[in-house]
């Protein structure tokens, strides 16, 4: 794909900012401000104005799934390893946070990273033997491991209380500040989600991300170009499971109750559907896909029993009519790269090559 | 001695479950063979088979032997419909590059999944989400004594039906022109097209055959367990999928052998473990197999994809 080739266009060298660069910088700032205004302005305002716990709940769920979808996109979209057991790592994170806070009484500031690290560690253990599997074999291995983790969560009653789930998980609290109201809960989740997406953005939109795309396109070729394929695959998988674990911790602390059924196979498929509908390999696509797949069933509540049929039909139609997803990878990469490349010119006044 | 008989009985139960998985796994294998895509809606075909069988039984009360052909026809129809709806739109591009493209394959996989969600929800709507009982005249749970072992009639019916269907499948694949076409398309779709095989028709036939096997498995299990629900297809679907992968994706004997292995080990495991843990056996077998045989036990070196 030509978007991965460094852009060799040469801009006039001058220390002053080219006019187009200023325009780009302006547009970039504009969009960032618009997005942040929606996430931290419009949505909280709507929650406060309506006082509806339903709206807040959907907003929180949407933010959690944005993290999940963005993290699955990192491994499946960017690194090209089809994983259909992502919900299991989400579950590990959720259970880790729930058990650490209810049994050991650890505060949120500890359980959040701990949940991510535990999920990442399990991801590392899973990745070691499965990384040499190719294509569909890897997908099936993740499916099998995902179901194994589900069976363990369901049956290890002494630790997880089995199908009864864990109740009474304390809400998010930070140095004495407690997220008791729905609005503050939403704000805490939104801040963490934005940080997660930002970290994933810096990881994927970089030379490191290009290396991941190279092994997606052809891992033998990437190997011959000096990319350490196995190490990169393991790293990508561990990063992805880390963020899934963080999402799980957020679920635990916002819903106060978790049960194994939250982390079944269908949940993995839902996350995969978000990535595909949004556009494989496109980080903005993953975010939009997650919002779409969470908001759509709620928007269709009026048609009652038919709404899951409508969700299936929408998924089908969007795959049929938008095979590259809502925000295709090529377009979104070009967008990000342009922004980066203009930034580069401002520094050296030279050629805009690749990422910054 | 008592223990031995008991174990033998569990093995027989396991084999009958294993044959059900095998019938489904063959459907997966055939369809994966011709299209290189996993058909996620296969579990729904199984459920449709069970529900059509139940509808026929409650409406007409025919003898059991007459139910099976009707279910076969329903299975073939649903297979053809599934192919038309979920798979054909994604075969617009027939060149080699798009056939091997990962995006295209993942889109097809997801479309079969979307269609399976739609089918399941429609069935939920029509029949309700609860278990439906089977009229007791048709239940296949009467025990039959063979020597010291007690075997349910259901097991015997499953053995007989599977034997007939496996025989018919072998005949179809290795003795007929259609079977030759299916094997040619699985081997190399573009090559098959070049030598004048109507690949679209072959793919439709494969779907019909695979779905007939799946639908039969559905009604047999429905009559054996005595309960049918819109969600019944999920678990055997996943197990059959696992059996297909353990067998090496493209090998029918491999898929059958692994399906039987899964069935028997699950059935024996219920003796030592509580039933909740028995699924762990299936998935551990899968992961162990993949670690030691990255291409499945009976798979041969496939093209890297």
Image (cartoon, rainbow, N blue to C red):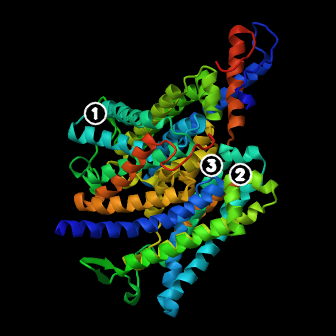
- Tell which tag, 1 or 2, sits nearer the viewer: 2
Badge 1 sits on which subunit? Answer: A
* Residue B188 tag number: 2
- Give coordinates of residue B107: x percent, y percent: 65, 51
Please state which of residues B31 and A113 is positioned toward the viewer in this rendering: B31
Separation of marks 1 and 2 at Cα, in angstroms: 59 Å
Query: Is label 1 in contact with label 3 (beta carbons under 8 Å)?
Result: no
Q: Which residue is mark 1?
A: A107
Q: Do pointers 3 and 2 mark residues of a single chain?
A: yes
- Residue at 72% x, 17% y is A353
Separation of marks 1 and 3 at Cα, in angstroms: 41 Å
Q: Residues within 10 Å of mark 1 (few under 14, many from 20)?
A: some
Q: Is residue B12 visible?
A: yes
Q: Do pointers 1 and 3 mark residues of a single chain?
A: no
Question: For the residue labelled by badge 3, is the local secondary structure a helix, a strand or a loop?
Answer: helix
Badge 2 sits on which subunit? Answer: B
Above or below A231: residue B182: below
Q: Residues within 10 Å of mark 3 (few under 14, many from 20)?
A: some
Separation of marks 3 and 2 at Cα, in angstroms: 20 Å
Badge 3 sits on which subunit? Answer: B
Q: Quadrant of residue A100?
A: top left
Please state which of residues A321 and B86 is positioned toward the viewer in this rendering: B86
Farthest top residue?
A: A15
- Give coordinates of residue B30: x percent, y percent: 60, 61
* Residue B106 tag number: 3
């Amino acid at each position: 794909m030509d978007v991965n080739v460094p852009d060799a266009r040469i801009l006039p060298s001058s220390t002053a900012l080219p006019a187009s660069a200023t325009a780009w910088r302006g547009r970039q700032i504009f969009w960032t401000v618009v997005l942040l205004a929606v996430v931290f302005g419009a949505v909280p305002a709507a929650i406060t104005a309506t006082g509806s716990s339903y709206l807040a709940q959907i907003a929180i769920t949407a933010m959690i799934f944005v993290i999940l979808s963005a993290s699955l996109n990192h491994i499946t979209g960017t690194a090209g390893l089809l994983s259909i057991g992502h919900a299991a790592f989400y579950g590990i994170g959720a259970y880790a946070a729930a058990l650490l806070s209810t049994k050991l009484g650890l505060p949120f500031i500890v359980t959040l990273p701990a949940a991510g690290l535990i999920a990442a560690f399990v991801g590392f253990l899973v990745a070691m033997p499965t990384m040499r599997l190719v294509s569909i074999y890897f997908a099936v291995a993740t499916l099998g491991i995902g179901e194994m983790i589900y069976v363990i969560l369901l049956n290890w009653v002494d630790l997880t209380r089995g199908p009864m789930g864990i109740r009474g998980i304390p809400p998010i609290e930070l140095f004495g500040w407690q997220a008791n109201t729905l609005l503050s809960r939403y704000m805490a989740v939104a801040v963490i989600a934005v940080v997660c997406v930002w970290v994933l953005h810096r990881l994927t939109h970089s030379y490191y991300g290009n290396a991941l795309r190279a092994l997606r396109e052809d891992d033998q070729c990437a190997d011959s170009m000096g990319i350490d394929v196995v190490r990169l695959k393991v790293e990508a998988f561990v990063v992805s499971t880390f963020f899934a674990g963080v999402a799980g911790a957020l679920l635990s602390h916002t819903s106060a109750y978790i049960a194994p059924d939250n982390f079944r196979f269908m949940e993995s498929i839902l996350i995969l559907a978000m990535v595909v509908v949004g556009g494989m390999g496109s980080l903005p696509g993953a975010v939009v896909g997650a919002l779409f797949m969470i908001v759509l069933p709620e928007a269709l509540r009026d048609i009652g029993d038919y709404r899951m049929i409508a969700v299936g039909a929408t998924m089908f139609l969007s795959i049929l009519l938008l095979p590259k997803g809502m925000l295709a990878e090529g377009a979104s990469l070009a967008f990000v790269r342009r922004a980066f490349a203009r930034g580069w010119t401002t520094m050296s006044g030279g050629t805009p090559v690749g990422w910054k | 001695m008592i223990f031995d008989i008991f174990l033998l009985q569990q093995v027989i139960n396991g084999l009958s479950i294993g044959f059900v998985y095998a019938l489904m796994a063959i459907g997966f294998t055939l369809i994966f063979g011709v299209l290189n895509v996993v058909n996620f809606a296969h579990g729904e075909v199984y459920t449709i088979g069970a529900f059509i069988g139940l509808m026929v039984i409650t409406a007409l009360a025919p003898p059991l032997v007459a139910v099976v052909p009707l279910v076969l026809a329903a299975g073939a129809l649903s297979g053809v419909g599934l192919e038309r709806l979920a798979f054909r739109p994604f075969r617009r591009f027939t060149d080699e590059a798009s056939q091997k493209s990962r995006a295209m394959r993942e889109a097809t996989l997801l479309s079969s999944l979307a269609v399976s969600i739609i089918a399941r929800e429609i069935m939920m709507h029509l029949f309700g989400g609860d278990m439906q009982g089977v009229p007791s005249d048709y239940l296949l749970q009467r025990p039959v004594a063979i020597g010291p072992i007690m075997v349910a009639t259901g097991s015997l019916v499953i053995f007989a039906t599977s034997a007939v269907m496996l025989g018919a499948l072998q005949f179809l694949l290795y003795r007929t022109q259609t079977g030759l076409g299916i094997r040619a398309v699985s081997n190399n779709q573009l090559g098959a097209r070049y030598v004048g095989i109507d690949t679209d028709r072959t793919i439709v036939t494969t779907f019909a055959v695979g779905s007939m096997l799946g639908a039969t498995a559905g009604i047999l299990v429905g009559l054996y367990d005595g309960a049918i629900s819109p969600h019944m297809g999920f678990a055997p679907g996943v197990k059959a999928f696992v059996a297909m992968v353990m067998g090496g994706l493209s090998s029918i004997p491999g898929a059958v052998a692994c399906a039987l292995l899964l069935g028997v080990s699950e059935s024996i495991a219920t003796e030592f473990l509580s039933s909740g843990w028995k699924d762990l056996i299936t998935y551990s077998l899968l992961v162990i197999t993949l670690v030691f045989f990255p291409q499945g036990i009976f798979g041969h070196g496939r093209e890297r994809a």
